Image (cartoon, rainbow, N blue to C red):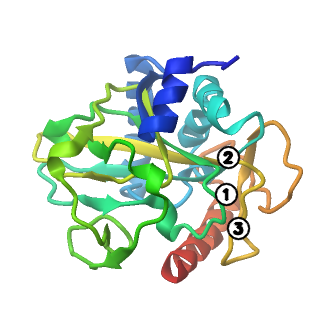
Amino acid sequence: MPKYLSERQLHDYQTNGCIFPLTIMSVEGARHHRSRLETVEAEHGSMHYLVKPYLVLSSTAEIGRNPILLDAVEDILGPDILMWDSAYVIKEPHDSHYVSWHQDLMYWGLNSDRLVSAWVALTKSNPQNGCMKFISGSHSGGKIEHRDTYAADNILHRGQELAVAIDETEAVDIVLEPGQVSLHHGWVFHASNPNPSNDRRIGLTFQYVSPSVRQMFSPNESATLVRGVDNYGHFQPEPHCESDFSPEGVAFQKKVQALKHAVFDRA
């Protein structure tokens, strides 16, 4: 029996490649985490796209271990779960930046699709502020070729985009309230538009993998065991963040960020 997801939700994930909305915290809880993030940003600058912020921010680490979120992920991946990556995806008010149509697993260097991406909303996320959108069922075809554009306003590392035409009329907007989350498959086509609204759109992504997954381009990748056991040892263990910007966490995160960018450039 599933721990959190219904049989219908599991079916929809397998069929559509994405399910939403799932509520993992209250609106007040999301506001609390937004406040903690913005307090840190006031001193250290934007946390947008910082690699693995859960290594240096206690708020991020807490969300990544949210038991409701992990229950939902367990229903898809099974009882053994590694938190492999994370990032804040922040669009400022009247921001022209966007995310092109792409597949996550195309450039992550992993040997398996035993991965679930969680997109946690710390603010409203809707068509008015550039919410994520996806093409239902697009994960079923597996890997599709991409091209690098290096477009100035594209949030992705190399401006990657699918090398196939996308029918925008088929796109499904992933509308979330603060404290809600979507889960999507690593091969699903997804994208997002700019944010023309008057408020920030703050999303926090987590990538959870089965311990059987391994990195093909580096033996030095790391991950955090958040549930169950790791009988494979494909990823180095990570320090647990007890306080914001601890010296150990900062040093480890810097090494991880350099490694991630090297992998992105090879994959």
Residue sitting at x 73%, y 35%? 78
Residue lying furthest right: 231
Question: Which quadrant is home to the N terminus?
Answer: top right
Location of mark 2 (residue) = 241
Which callout, 3 or 2, points to the residue nearer the camera?
A: 3
Secondary structure found at label 2: loop
Measure the C-alpha gap from mark 3 to mark 2. Answer: 18 Å
Q: Position of residue 106 (x, y in %)?
A: 48, 67
Q: Position of residue 73 (x, y in %)?
A: 61, 34
Which callout, 3 or 1, points to the residue nearer the camera?
A: 3
The three-letter code of the residue at mark 1 reads Gly
Frontmost residue, 225 versus 3: 3
Q: Crowding at label 2, few (<14), some or many (≥20) Cα neighbours within 10 Å?
A: many
Q: Residue 262's image quarter?
A: bottom right
Residue sitting at x 67%, y 60%? 247
Frontmost residue, 4 versus 67: 4
Kindly indicate whether the residue at mark 1 contacts the one at mark 2 (C-beta within 8 angstroms): yes
Frontmost residue, 262 versus 209: 209
Q: Mark 3 vs mark 2: which is more N-terminal? A: 3
Residue sitting at x 33%, y 42%? 202
Location of mark 3 (residue) = 221
The three-letter code of the residue at mark 3 reads Glu
Secondary structure found at label 3: loop
* Horizontal side, residue 67 vs residue 205: left or right: right
Residue lying furthest front: 141
Measure the C-alpha gap from mark 2 to mark 1. Answer: 7 Å
Can see residue 155? yes
Location of mark 1 (residue) = 249
